Amino acid sequence: MQLNPGTKTIERDLLEALAKAEAFPDEMKLDLGKLQFQRCSRTDKGVSAARQVVSIKMSPEKRVIELANQYLPPQIRIMGLRRATKTFNSKTACSSRTYEYLLPTYAFAPYAWTTLDYRIDDSTREKVGRLLKMYEKSHNYHNFTSGKKYEEDSAMRHIISFTCDAPFLASRSSQPQILNSTTQEKREEEREGEREGENGKELQTSAKTKTESSEVENDAAKCGDEQNVKMEDGNAVEKSDSGADCGHMGKEESKQSAKKVEFMTLKVKGQSFMIHQIRKMVGLVIAIVRGFAPETTLIEAFQKGKVDIPRAPALGLLLENVSLSYQLVHNILV
């Protein structure tokens, strides 16, 4: 949500659509000063927004939404229009922003286990939640952005809450499925099957299995060849041994696991955020959980010294909601 010369952005599409809807003269569409244009949150490339609020000086025509939506691409929609006071500024009136980061749980997997059939265990999830909670309250985030010095007042940011939701399964060919009581039981059965396999009972690792059908062998090979987890900065995690993670499951379990991936949503609410801040906050937690950095790194990152922090990908980060402390004194137009 920003204007960059020569680049197609959501903000540019919005202003052009409003101009075509005659909300303001066409020659003013890129003059943000005259339009008194502001947005609650400025999202970077690759970051999505489920809810966004902007303030703009424009004609109070009631049909503006209907007309502008005709000129907008299907993934962008104006949902409402309200008249505000002359001095209203959506950026300064926004008291907090809530972001969600959706990622596969295998991002937290041990170094040698990065296949898509990974299921996060309770202890790992508790560790993720504990590390996220360490971000709460006010800290100096100069290491979590670019071009910011420790001495600058703007490096101080206040995080209201940072939590992780319950994991859920998503089929590669269908909609995500929340882990309710039924799916939770299946997940426990998978873990029980893994434990039985480790004890040398009915289930054996595919690396040692020589009498399985070719179909099971192919499934194991596919599971071992799954793509690596990559940090945006370019460092790839090595693949696990071919079939090692699938071998603890039987034929049917292997097929089902290959069709579903486990995801988890991290939710952070703060007063305001700097460029790359959330992605680096997530990236550091991933690095700690996977064993690439000690837990003390998170505390050290708040100090004056320079700490290089990996940046999680933009894909998966979503502006979920914005909170306004502004009291309307005009009637709703639309």
Image (cartoon, helix red, strand yellow):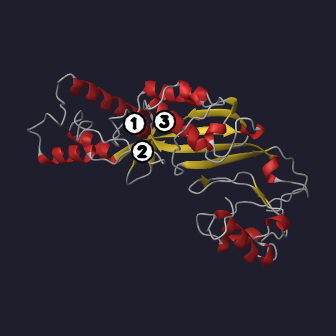
In this picture, is 35 found above or below 20? above
Instruction: Report whether 224 appears left or right of 313.
Output: left
Q: Depth-wise, is mark 3 or mark 1 nearer the camera?
A: 3
- Could you tell me how far apart the alpha carbons at marks 3 and 1 are, in whole angstroms? 26 Å
Q: Give residue 183's mark.
A: 1
Mark 3 lies on residue: 286
What amino acid type should be assigned to the residue bearing mark 1?
Thr
In this picture, is 38 found above or below 291? below
Outermost residue to the left? 211
Q: Is mark 3 on a helix, strand or loop?
A: helix
Residue 2 position within the rendered picture, expressed as x and y whole percent measured from the top left: 68, 60
Mark 2 lies on residue: 235
| Marks 3 & 1, CB-CB < 8 Å contact | no
Instruction: Classify the position of the C terminus by image quarter.
Output: bottom right
- Could you tell me how far apart the alpha carbons at marks 1 and 2 are, in whole angstroms? 34 Å
Q: Give residue 169's mark.
A: none
Instruction: Report whether 287 appears left or right of 258.
Output: right
Instruction: Report whether 213 appears left or right of 163.
Output: left
Asked if residue 77 can be seen in this view, the reply is no
